[in-house]
Amino acid sequence: MLKFTPILLAVLYAFAMYRFSVWRTQRELDAQSTELADPTLKRMTDRLAKALDLPRIKVHIYEIDPVNGLAAPDGRIFITRGFYRKFQNGEVTAEEMASVIAHELGHVALGHTRRRMIDFSGQNALRTALAMILSRLLPGIGVWIANGLTSLLAARLSRGDEYEADEYAAALLTKAQIGTQAQKSLFQKLESLTEARGGAVPAWLMSHPKTHERIAAIEKLEAKWS
Ligand SMILES: [Zn+2]
């Protein structure tokens, strides 16, 4: 029994973490967001809504500076104030904003947001359990190995989600007659932004696979669909 105690503790910890992260994320987003009210972007989201046979798509502004788009576990879509500012000053087009919204809609539609919360707390639990076991076997470096293994697993899981969300967005943008060009040009813009800022990666790219690989994946879809 004593042998399994670390694992049992880790499972309980994971469950508590999951409940806590959902609650904390929701509270943080409620406190720091407002509904997006932009007539140009509304025309874009209306086209996406029509393609999905939905009355409308609600988008919220999350009041933080890092350039990012996100989907909450409850299915709400957020664009950060920093990202919206890039649209307002003309650095990012309405079509490109639509491509971010379509990508986040993909995460919601494909059930990634809920699973990601579970993944995230599951990863913490796995890290804790592995660290407890490995540091007993390999004092000193056990924790380090546990961290490395968990991060590797996390990266593999999220990469798959990103390609799926891109594919969903590409299909939706095609159906809404906005096209996939904006998707690709935004990736390139964000990447050159990274270079201009001396390697500080925008948050939206950081959690995503390499730009040229994402563009190549979209071009493969275009070839398949044309
Ligand atoms: Zn994503």
Image (cartoon, rainbow, N blue to C red):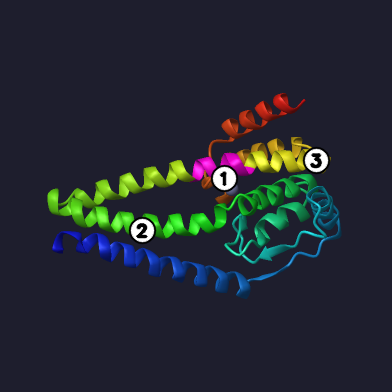
Quadrant of res 125: bottom left
Determine which residue is flagged by label 2.
124
Give the SS element for disc 3: helix
Q: Residues within 10 Å of mark 1 (few under 14, many from 20)?
A: some
Q: Nearer the viewer, residue 200 or 181?
A: 181
- Name the main secondary structure of what is drawn in magenta: helix
What is the spatial separation of the Cα atoms under label 2 and label 1, in whole angstroms? 23 Å
Q: Amino acid at mark 2?
A: Asn
Q: Nearer the viewer, mark 3 or mark 2?
A: 3
Q: Is residue 172 a member of the stretch shown in magenta? A: no
Q: Is residue 162 a member of the stretch shown in magenta? A: yes
Q: Residue at x 78, y 45 (%)?
A: 95
Q: Residues within 10 Å of mark 2 (few under 14, many from 20)?
A: many
Give the SS element for disc 1: helix
Q: Nearer the viewer, mark 3 or mark 1?
A: 3
Residue 30: image location, x then y, percent? 62, 73
Image label count: 3
Mark 3 / mark 2, whichever is N-terminal = 2
Determine which residue is flagged by label 1.
205
Q: Which residues are magenta?
A: 158-165
**Can the viewer see residue 203?**
yes
Instruction: In the displayed orientation, state which residue is furthest to the front.
Output: 1
Q: Residues within 10 Å of mark 3 (few under 14, many from 20)?
A: some
Determine which residue is flagged by label 3.
175
**Can the viewer see residue 198?**
no
Q: Nearer the viewer, mark 2 or mark 1?
A: 2
Q: Residue at x 50, y 55 (%)?
A: 116
In this rendering, position of residue 125 left or right of residue 192 = left
